[in-house]
Image (tube, grey):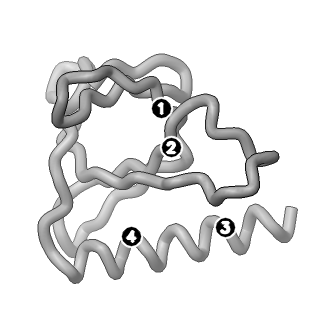
Amino acid sequence: MNQGENHITVVDEEGNEQLCEILFTFDSEEFGKSYVLYYPVGASEDDEEEIEIHASAYIPSENGEEGDLQPIETEEEWDLIEEMLNTFLDQEEED
């Protein structure tokens, strides 16, 4: 996972690289993982369609280099992510 300021490069199933902007990250003690929520760069908020937000678990590397993105495997993790996303979006609207 390449990480710039607020960007990561995600490689999809076909091997295409997609530059994504990080929405936010959080840690879960319950699952012992960190999570990153992101969306493709260029998906502007002016579009009629909603921005597709992606989420992955990630394992930070020990030496401060880039970590590895992992798929999210359980319903419980998805529920947690959805909850965190809703909280994040509510706070954004208040600002």
The amino acid on which the numbered mark 1 sits, given as a three-letter code, is Cys
Percent coordinates x, y for residue 26 in the rendering? 41, 56
* C-alpha separation, residue under disc 1 versus residue under disc 2: 5 Å
Q: Are marks 1 and 2 in contact (CB under 8 Å)?
A: yes
Q: Are marks 2 and 4 in contact (CB under 8 Å)?
A: no
Mark 1 lies on a secondary structure that is: strand
Of badges 1 and 4, nearer the viewer stands 1
Q: Are marks 3 and 2 in contact (CB under 8 Å)?
A: no
Is 39 situated left or right of 63 in this image? Answer: right
The amino acid on which the numbered mark 2 sits, given as a three-letter code, is Tyr
Query: What residue is disc 2 on?
Result: 39
Q: Is residue 68 above or below residue 19?
A: below
Q: Are marks 3 and 1 in contact (CB under 8 Å)?
A: no
* C-alpha separation, residue under disc 3 versus residue under disc 4: 12 Å
Question: Residue sitting at 34 percent across and 58 percent down?
Answer: 27
Query: What residue is disc 4 on?
Result: 81
Viewer-proximal residue, 88 or 44? Answer: 44
In the figure, residue 50 lies in which quadrant? Answer: bottom right
In the figure, residue 80 lies in which quadrant? Answer: bottom left
Q: Which is more N-terminal, label 4 or label 3?
A: 4
Q: Which is more N-terminal, label 1 or label 3?
A: 1
Q: Is residue 62 above or below residue 92?
A: above
The amino acid on which the numbered mark 3 sits, given as a three-letter code, is Leu
Is 32 situated left or right of 93 in this image? Answer: left
**Quarter of the picture holding the C terminus:** bottom right
Mark 4 lies on a secondary structure that is: helix
**Quarter of the picture holding the N terminus:** top left
